[in-house]
Image (spheres, rainbow, N blue to C red):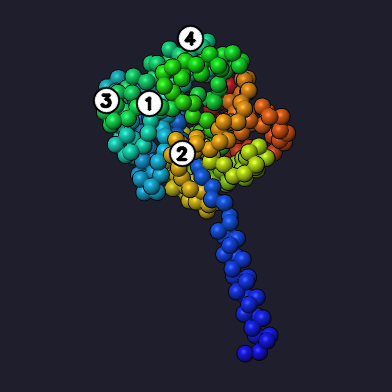
Amino acid sequence: MQRGTILGILSLTLLLGSLALGQEARPERQIAITIDDLPFGGPDLGLSRIRAENEAILATLRKEGVSATGFVNEGKLYVPGEIDARAALLDKWLEAGQELGNHTFSHLSLRDTPVPAFEEDLVRGETVTRWLAGRHGGKLRYFRHPFLHTGPSLEARQDFERFLAARGYTVAPVTIENSDYIFSRVYNEMKTKGDAAGMRRTADAYLGFTAAQLDFWEGVAQAVVGRPMRHVLLLHDNEINAGHLGDLLALLRRRRYRFVPLEEALRDEAYRLPDAYAGRAGVSWLYRWAVSRGIKIDWQREPEPPAEIQTLYGRIMGPPK
């Protein structure tokens, strides 16, 4: 065999070997899926649509083999003549092997509610869920603050967190969210009108915005944590996720994410970083860690939902009250 041929084969072998090593060296990302506002997010669309919404989300989670944590607002159960049927929706989540957490009874904001009243609302919000979880051999472990409002002052925040710990709760943080409630409200309107093309456009915009948010927060994580971390994604129990959760999970898989339960995600040491944040905004825990550590991030670069979606959402919601 000629020397040139041998060198060519060696070079090709080294190139293929380096590409294989590069593929192996690419870090696998991990993410926990959390879904707020069970048994439905946004406007009450009636029991039949709410049931279909939950069935579709659970079917996708089952098909994709994803363990999620759903956070419940029990106040949404109390519709005359439908209480049992709505509670049964929560039971379906547990039957499917998913976990439920507490999101308060009334979806109050700790920013605007005195701590004692907020604590009372939390207790009201665990009655049915705790009973259902117990029937399935589980318990309530996680609490998610509505609006991600953790308290207007450090004193209020710490006071409430002591209460949470005494009741056996762990705070469920969020590192990435995608404003799905905005897209879903537009999607609701399109679906009610039978506008299939509008629904498709809204879903495409939703997935595109989610990709942009992932780009941004992955970059923030690299700046704050110094490595890929186990993220916690905030979604809502709504119609756009009922229709397109599979597309969203496929997007995450293309970005090399592996889905892990919330419990596993929180084992990441990032969640032990200093967090001295207190204020009126509901923000990602990555923002809290960056501020607490004095790390400068250009927050103006965080993407906004497309202008068309924001305009449609504004028309639907009307002027602020």
**Where does label 2 land, which residue?**
264
Label 2 crowd bin: few (<14), some (14–19), many (20+), radius 10 Å: few
Residue 279 position by quadrant? top right
Q: Secondary structure at mark 3?
A: helix
Q: Position of residue 31 (x, y in %)?
A: 50, 42
Q: Secondary structure at mark 2?
A: helix
**Where does label 1 land, which residue?**
140
* 4 or 3: tag closer to the N-terminus: 3
Q: Nearer the viewer, mark 4 or mark 2?
A: 2
- Give residue 194's mark: none
Label 3 crowd bin: few (<14), some (14–19), many (20+), radius 10 Å: few
Residue at 34% in and 27% down: 139
- Please name the amino acid that badge 2 sits on: Glu
Instruction: Work out how far the residue at label 3 is from the one at label 1, CA to CA, in angstroms.
Output: 20 Å
Residue at 41% in and 44% down: 66
Q: Nearer the viewer, mark 2 or mark 3?
A: 2
Instruction: Work out how far the residue at label 4 is from the one at label 3, CA to CA, in angstroms.
Output: 29 Å
| Mark 2 in CB contact with mark 3 (< 8 angstroms) | no
On-image quarter of the N terminus: bottom right
Q: Specify whether residue 13 is in view.
A: yes
Residue 298 position by quadrant? top right
* 4 or 2: tag closer to the N-terminus: 4
Q: Is residue 264 above or below residue 169?
A: below
- Please name the amino acid that badge 4 sits on: Pro
* 2 or 3: tag closer to the N-terminus: 3
**Where does label 4 land, which residue?**
116
Q: Position of residue 315 (x, y in %)?
A: 56, 30
Q: Position of residue 320 (x, y in %)?
A: 58, 21
| Mark 3 in CB contact with mark 1 (< 8 angstroms) | no
Q: Nearer the viewer, mark 1 or mark 2?
A: 2
**Where does label 3 land, which residue?**
84
